């Protein structure tokens, strides 16, 4: 009897990708096979994103396509926390479950297509099944969030912060490194808050007690032999000691992904952003003094309700001073159920949003281009993502996969995905570097 086959659609952010990997690992362990086409599958799972209305529309379209091509569809993920919205469009679904509801998804699969045999756990490689390329992996250290940013419904969807004990995270990281993962991307909704819910309780790791705390976890991860990249960090004072670690330890990458979202105090207040009272420019200066190679990436929202021209100018001035290396900008989109909708603040018209967005991007293009120019002539380690016949595509320590720029590497010898090579940088453009392997 052939193994039951499941087709899987994974939408949304890296956190959702980690959920997908866990569900797939479990199903593979039970003898299910994955198929690339809906038509040949026994059932389809759609892991949805429900953050913005555009993401919801994409999720609903993916569900529609799965229903049309297959008919047996199980929906999970962030949008699954709002089943009525899904059922209003698609009625004939086998099940709808919310984010991180691994057990419910697996039960729904069992009900639709029973497993062929008893579990054969040895079908699964020890690091689990990964949807990312083999040489890097996302490491989710907590679920949920204690903040209440007014534009965000994630705490409603995913609940308050629940951290994984440090030893648990470290064991997963160790397994990944043993399976040839060269770069660990630490993710959560609020990485610097890690362990707060557990009161930083220590757990046993390699014969020692390690606190469930941001600094302690990063220090231990840095010992595993892979690059460690930190995402979704807020500029709380205790991040300072982690920056010192970056300066001291080669594997803790001098890279911080901090979603600042704005710089004008009254917009940050209306957004109810964590750490909005911190003097972030001073902090960034101090970090760079300790760790001169530090790369800072961030995202910003323009056109938040009540954002005046003066607020927007304050953001541009802040960006000019902060000289962040990487910036992504979004035009504000109201999210159903978010507190920002009830603030009673004036809505920024779409054409103003579009103009502000273009100005931020233009301003930042110049800043990031100038930052990259400073790297010409330097020799930097580069991890190869995509080998090519003459030029391979890779990333330096300053570039996270999928969101940042790339380093294009000319090489006489063949390079493989996951190789880390030293590259002499020969030229730069607005977002990328070009160089030669030495
Ligand atoms: S920090 Fe704010 S934006 Fe991020 S998940 Fe928490 S509430 Fe949402």
Image (cartoon, rainbow, N blue to C red):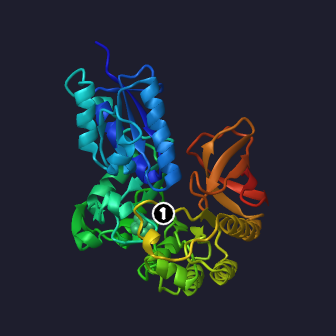
Q: Is residue 357 left or right of residue 332?
A: right
Q: Residue furthest right?
A: 427
From the viewer's perspective, is residue 362 above or below residue 279?
Answer: above
User: Could you tell me if residue 120 is visible in this image?
Assistant: no
Q: Where does residue 358 sit, x and y in percent of width and height?
A: 72, 65
Judging by the rendered image, the residue that carries numbered circle 1 is 231
Identified at 63% across, 80% down, the residue is 308
From the viewer's perspective, is residue 188 above or below residue 28?
Answer: below
User: Could you tell me if residue 287 is visible in this image?
Assistant: yes
Identified at 66% across, 77% down, the residue is 319
Q: Nearer the viewer, residue 268 or 291?
A: 268
For label 1, being within 8 Å of ligand 1 is answered no
Identified at 28% across, 30% down, the residue is 122
Q: Where does residue 269 sit, x and y in percent of width and height?
A: 48, 82
Q: Residue furthest left?
A: 118
Number of disc labels: 1
Q: Which quadrant of the view contains residue 423?
A: bottom right
Q: Where does residue 379 sit, x and y in percent of width and height?
A: 70, 61
Identified at 68% across, 66% down, the residue is 357
Q: Quadrant of the N terminus?
A: top left
Q: Is residue 267 left or right of residue 5?
A: right
Q: Nearer the viewer, residue 160 or 436?
A: 160
Q: Where does residue 44 sit, x and y in percent of width and height?
A: 38, 30
User: Which secondary structure lies at badge 1?
Assistant: loop
């Amino acid at each position: 009897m052939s193994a039951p086959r499941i087709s899987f659609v994974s939408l949304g952010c890296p956190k959702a990708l980690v959920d997908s990997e866990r569900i797939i690992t479990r199903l593979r362990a039970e003898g299910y096979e994955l198929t690339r086409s809906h038509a040949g599958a026994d059932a389809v799972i759609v892991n949805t994103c429900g953050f913005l209305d555009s993401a919801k529309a994409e999720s609903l379209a993916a569900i529609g396509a799965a229903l049309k091509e297959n008919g047996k569809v199980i929906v999970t993920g962030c949008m699954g926390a709002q089943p009525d919205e899904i059922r209003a469009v698609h009625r004939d679904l086998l099940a709808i479950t919310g984010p991180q509801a691994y057990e419910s998804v697996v039960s729904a699969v069992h009900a639709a297509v029973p497993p062929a045999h008893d579990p054969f756990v040895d079908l699964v490689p020890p690091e689990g099944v990964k949807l990312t390329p083999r040489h890097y992996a996302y490491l989710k250290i907590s679920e949920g969030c204690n903040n209440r940013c007014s534009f965000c419904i994630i705490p409603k969807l995913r609940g308050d912060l629940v951290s994984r004990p440090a030893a648990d995270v470290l064991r997963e990281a160790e397994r990944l490194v043993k399976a040839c993962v060269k770069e660990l991307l630490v993710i959560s909704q609020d990485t610097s808050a890690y362990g707060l819910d557990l009161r930083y309780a220590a757990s046993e790791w390699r014969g020692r007690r390690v606190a469930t705390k941001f600094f302690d976890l990063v220090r231990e991860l840095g010992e595993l032999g892979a690059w460690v990249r930190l995402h979704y960090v807020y500029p709380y004072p205790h991040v300072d000691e982690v920056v010192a670690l970056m300066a001291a330890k080669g594997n803790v990458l001098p890279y911080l992904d901090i979603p600042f979202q704005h710089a004008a105090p009254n917009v940050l207040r209306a957004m109810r952003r964590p750490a909005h009272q911190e003097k972030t420019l001073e902090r960034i200066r101090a970090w760079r003094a300790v760790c001169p190679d530090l790369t800072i990436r961030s995202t910003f929202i323009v056109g938040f309700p009540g954002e005046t021209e003066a607020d927007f100018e304050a953001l541009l001035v802040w960006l000019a001073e902060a000289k962040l290396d990487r910036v992504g900008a979004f035009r504000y989109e109201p999210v159903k159920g978010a507190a920002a909708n009830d603030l009673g603040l004036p809505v920024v018209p779409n054409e103003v949003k579009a103009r502000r967005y273009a100005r931020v991007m233009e301003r930042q293009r110049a800043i990031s281009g100038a930052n990259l120019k400073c790297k010409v002539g330097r020799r930097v380690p580069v991890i190869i993502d995509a080998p090519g016949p003459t030029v391979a595509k890779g990333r330096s320590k300053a570039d996270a996969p999928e969101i940042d720029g790339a380093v294009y590497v000319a090489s006489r010898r063949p390079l493989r995905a996951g190789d880390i090579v030293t590259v002499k940088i020969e030229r730069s453009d607005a977002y990328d570097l070009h160089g030669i392997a030495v």
